[in-house]
Amino acid sequence: MIRLPNFHENQEINAVRDEMGAYELGTLRLTRPANSLTMEELNELLGDGIDLPNLDDVKIGADGTIIYKNRRVVLYIRDVALYGNGRARERELPRYHVANCRTLDDMRAQRRFGRYVVAARSTGLFAINQIVKGRDPIRSDERLKICQNCLSRLRFDGFDYDMPSHRKQAIVEQFTLDRFFERYPHDVVSDSNADSELTARLNEYTGDFGLHATATKIRAGYRCEACGVALMERQLQRYLHAHHMNAIKYDNSANNLKALCIRCHAEEPGHAHMKTLPEYRDFITRRA
């Protein structure tokens, strides 16, 4: 065992302390932030995962990633019910999630979010309980695939549903959690600088959003990039919107803004309120 020296008896340190006027010695008390993981919880995350008590225990960062306490995590369904014989086939296994995507929005709407657990493995292997009626569950580590809705939400490697199928499949196959956590580090606290997306900046529109919106519509030729409806005429241009694909309202980068007619915009997650607007009803009437 290495014994540390008694710094109270170090003449050089005491001389500096006297020069500073620090005559009284302070005390050091180590504390753990209330919202940080315990070692036991971290071990669980790196193992089979932690069952979600309720949705409030999981936060969504401004970048769309999933956060549990002070860690970015992965969500997946651990208990898989099988209705045949034998082990689960790949198509019967769930996808795992790294972002707040459409699939999770649907699960919230169906109040089925409690089926998920949070985990922090980066190997791509996940603990799965395969459940067949009348039998003991089969516990196995399975290699799951990433949810494509998550890739679309994060625009990971430029993923877009409008891509040809072979390009989308290539991005799915090349995706690894090691690469994901390189881009989005596990430790959320490490991102907490003065202009942190996760802790400081409000998710609100910027003052120059109108300029970016106009540029987006011009690039699209004043056509909806979802349904293709043409809205070039001046009286129709108000029905064309610039949509933030990653839901970060201050991210006005060109690859994050998409020109959508008000009808297609209202179909995006979290935008159903647009269907109550007079402009929406006017547009639907015009298109009828």
Image: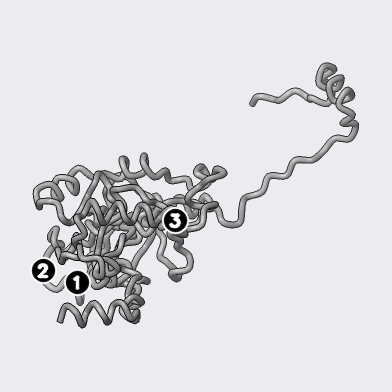
The residue carrying mark 1 is 132
Secondary structure, mark 2, is: loop
Which mark, residue 156?
none
Say what amino acid the circle numbered 3 marks. Gly
Q: Residue at point 31% right, 55% down?
A: 214
The residue carrying mark 3 is 61
Say what amino acid the circle numbered 2 marks. Asn
Cα–Cα gap, marks 1 and 2: 8 Å
Secondary structure, mark 1, is: strand
Q: Quadrant of residue 220?
A: bottom left
The quadrant the C terminus occupies is bottom left
Q: Residues within 10 Å of mark 3 (few under 14, many from 20)?
A: some
Cα–Cα gap, marks 3 and 1: 37 Å
Q: Position of residue 101 (x, y in %)?
A: 31, 62
Do labels 3 and 1 touch, CB within 8 Å? Answer: no
Q: Is residue 126 above or below residue 14?
A: below
How many numbered marks, from 0 up? 3
Q: Position of residue 232 (x, y in %)?
A: 20, 62
Q: Position of residue 18 (x, y in %)?
A: 89, 24
In this rendering, the label closer to the viewer, 3 or 2: 3
Do labels 1 and 2 touch, CB within 8 Å? Answer: yes
Which mark, residue 85?
2
